[in-house]
Image: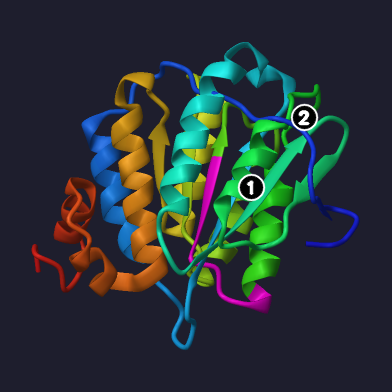
Amino acid sequence: MAKSDITRSRGSGRIAKSSTAQSSEKDVAAFLNAARSVSVAAGSDSGRLIFALDATMSRQPTWDAACGLQSEMFNAVGRVGSLNVQLVYFRGFGECQASRWVNDTRQLRDLMLRIDCRGGQTQIAKVLKHARDEARRKPVSALVFIGDAMEEDVDRLSQLAGELGMRRVPCFMFQEGGDPAAQTGFREIARLSGGAYLRLDSNAASALVNLLRAVAVYASGGLRALQNDKSHASQMLLEQLPGGKGS
């Protein structure tokens, strides 16, 4: 991404929690199915995962609750070895920041917990451009995005999502709340990039955390890593993948 679009951040702010929109079995199945697109680039010793967040004011009412779930998701990713993670967030008037790449996600979790919400429009296009530009420099295994709104031109976002799909960067779009425009946009971004869409549901928090961890395992070490991981979510994911149990 151009320097004017996104900046690097070493610290600041606090981040959000999730609402109670329901995640259907069909969406969970789609998430598992789409994770087959996630892989480690040939010649890479580790996968690279971008974890992006909407920190605009619309998330403030549920920020404390969402922060717990997002922190759990971050911790789950951090327990996976050989995976580099970058935190990206946007808020306020054109503020969009990206951390450095790290393999100790405790640093990024602590940064995330300090982020607070600020009023402003969504900047999803900046996030997608940033992921595209990072993938041009070095392969990116996946983008995970959490947000509750979409206030941008869906055609422009779709174009960027398609570019990410061509670069094999699936977008896993987690929606907080039930905004119909966000749902439409997030689903389209997921479809065009080869990723998946899910609603954040506090009743299914542990399942979502485990699913994200399974994607991180696959992003980090491919099919063999997933086969060696004995968690229920990894075994479910394995059944969906070419060369896995279900093949």
Of all residues, the one furthest to the top in this rendering is 61
Mark 2 or 1, closer to the camera: 1
- Label 1 crowd bin: few (<14), some (14–19), many (20+), radius 10 Å: many
Q: Is residue 38 visible?
A: no
Which dot marks residue 121?
2
Q: Position of residue 188 (x, y in %)?
A: 48, 45
Counting labels gives 2
The C terminus, quarter of image: bottom left
Say whether disc 2 or disc 1 marks the residue closer to the N-terminus: 1
Q: Position of residue 135 (x, y in %)?
A: 62, 71
Q: Residue at x 48, y 18 (%)?
A: 19
Which dot marks residue 108?
1
Q: Nearer the viewer, residue 81 or 165?
A: 81
Q: Nearer the viewer, residue 202 or 246?
A: 202
Of all residues, the one furthest to the bottom in this rendering is 43
The N terminus, quarter of image: bottom right
Please provide the residue range marked out in magenta. 136-145
- Secondary structure found at label 1: helix
Q: Residue at x 17, y 47 (%)?
A: 232
User: Is residue 85 shown left or right of residue 194?
Assistant: right
Of all residues, the one furthest to the left in this rendering is 246
Q: Nearer the viewer, residue 47 or 22?
A: 47
Which dot marks residue 59?
none
Q: Position of residue 132 (x, y in %)?
A: 65, 65
Q: Residue at x 50, y 26 (%)?
A: 68
Q: Position of residue 127 (x, y in %)?
A: 68, 50
- Secondary structure found at label 2: loop
**Kind of residue at badge 2:** Gln
User: Is residue 13 shown left or right of residue 36?
Assistant: right
Q: Residue at x 79, y 44 (%)?
A: 11
Gap in angstroms between the C-alphas marked 2 and 1: 24 Å
Residue 144 belongs to magenta span: yes
